[in-house]
Image (cartoon, rainbow, N blue to C red):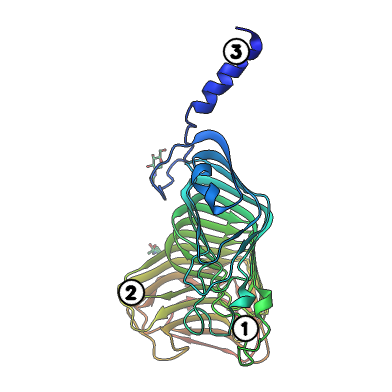
Amino acid sequence: MSFTSAVLALSLLLSQVAATPTLHKNSTLNAPRKIGKRCTGEITSLDDVAAAEECTTIVIGGFTVPAGQTFTLNPPDGAQVSLTGELTFGFENWAGPLMEITGNDITFNGGGHDLNGQGTLYWDGEGISGGVTKPDPLLRINMGGTFSDVQVVNSPGRAVAIGGSSLTVSGVIVNNAAGTAANSLSGGNPAGANTDGFDVSANDVTITGCTVNNQDDCLAINKGTSITFSNNICEGIGHGISIGSITSDVTVSGVTISGNTVTGTVNGLRIKTDATATGSIVENVIYENNKLSGITEFGVLIDQSYPSTLGTPGTGVIIENVSFDGTNTVAVGSSAHRVEVNCGSTSSCTGTWNWAGLDATGGTGSTVKNAPIVGGTY
Ligand SMILES: *[C@@H]1O[C@H](CO)[C@@H](O)[C@H](O)[C@H]1NC(C)=O
Ligand SMILES: *[C@@H]1O[C@H](CO)[C@@H](O)[C@H](O)[C@H]1NC(C)=O
């Protein structure tokens, strides 16, 4: 056998050997284990997906995803997925989602390309619970691993929903700035509504170095443990960084919100729990070194009366341990409230609330009801 044919035979053999999955230690499976083949699968239409998702390298070219269909991708464990062009999602009034990725220890690199939801064709100022049906969310990430460098443009409803566990999201831009202006259907209100940046119901998730410009929460944590939101930018007329709203029988445990810059949004930092919810807990929340400015309604709002704002609070959700560490500066607009805390009782807002790292300025003032806050300037 010549050297060349030996190499050929060896590489042929290797191409048939299953790639070894490289699951991180302690990572929880998001999908059944799936062993891939050492090949490169190219996707330039939905017809290519089934064959490509057998391979441990997947390259997605730019194309238009047909209206009314979800681009679902379930790569093998440990796969490398890259995007080399823009994905545009065809217009149709249906429920969505527009794209969904599942899998274990996946590396998804978007190369800075767009996922374009064509929101301008749907927006009517009424969001996802009113008006025409809007596909929602644009992108559902139910994978573990890393997801990076994508621009999500003009989501009809929510931009990115995160489930699963053991995931780092970085360098994602949610650009729904076009939804801020009114259109002919929105009655003078912003055309985009419910365009949440990141909705999280997941464990062991880090979202870092991302930018969100939208008309609803920049981050909304609905449930989960070990969630870090760091060094992100929230801008536009959005609703800021939020835990909640918290419904019954859910746990949010271990949230770190650090190094973020929030500019010009309606709210800054919020925890909102449903007045009627029971059996839920929000515990160990740390705000650290965040910079907020130009907030138009509430700098910091912790409210147990949702959906009312500063209404009659419930006591069925426990909020335990909320701290402001380092230096958090919260500068609010002239008619905004610096800090409002509206707890149902001192047993529903409990534990250690060390707010020494909070410096809130501007606006009309602050009110705290039933919370054991120590320290801080507000
Ligand atoms: C994580 O994995 C190590 C071994 O790799 C094990 O000792 C440890 O108990 C695991 N922790 C959890 C929370 O599963
Ligand atoms: C709340 O913090 C205190 C320390 O200040 C700690 O003893 C307690 O375990 C924490 N609560 C939870 C639910 O972790």
CA neighbours of label 3 inside 10 A, class few (<14), some (14 to 19), many (20+): few
| Residue marked by disc 1 | 191
Image position of 122 (left or right of 28): right
The numbered mark, 3 or 1, whose residue comes first in the sequence reads 3
Mark 2 and mark 3: Cα distance apart in space: 64 Å
Q: Amino acid at mark 1?
A: Ala
User: What kind of element bears circle 2?
Assistant: loop
Q: Residue at x 61, y 58 (%)?
A: 208
Image position of 113 (left or right of 52): right
What's the mark number on residue 6? 3
Looking at this view, name the residue that lies furthest to the top. Answer: 1
**Foreground pick, 360 / 275:** 275
The numbered mark, 2 or 3, whose residue comes first in the sequence reads 3
User: What kind of element bears circle 3?
Assistant: helix
| Quarter of the C terminus within the rendering | bottom right
Residue 276 in picture, x, y percent from top left: 33, 83
| Residue marked by disc 2 | 248
Q: Residue at x 48, y 64 (%)?
A: 200
**Foreground pick, 42 / 340:** 42
Q: Is residue 27 above or below residue 86?
A: above
Residue 245 in picture, x, y percent from top left: 44, 76
User: What kind of element bears circle 1?
Assistant: loop
Q: Is residue 19 above or below residue 274?
A: above
Mark 3 and mark 1: Cα distance apart in space: 64 Å
Residue 226 in sight in this render = yes
The numbered mark, 1 or 2, whose residue comes first in the sequence reads 1
Res 169 quadrant in image: bottom right
CA neighbours of label 1 inside 10 A, class few (<14), some (14 to 19), many (20+): many
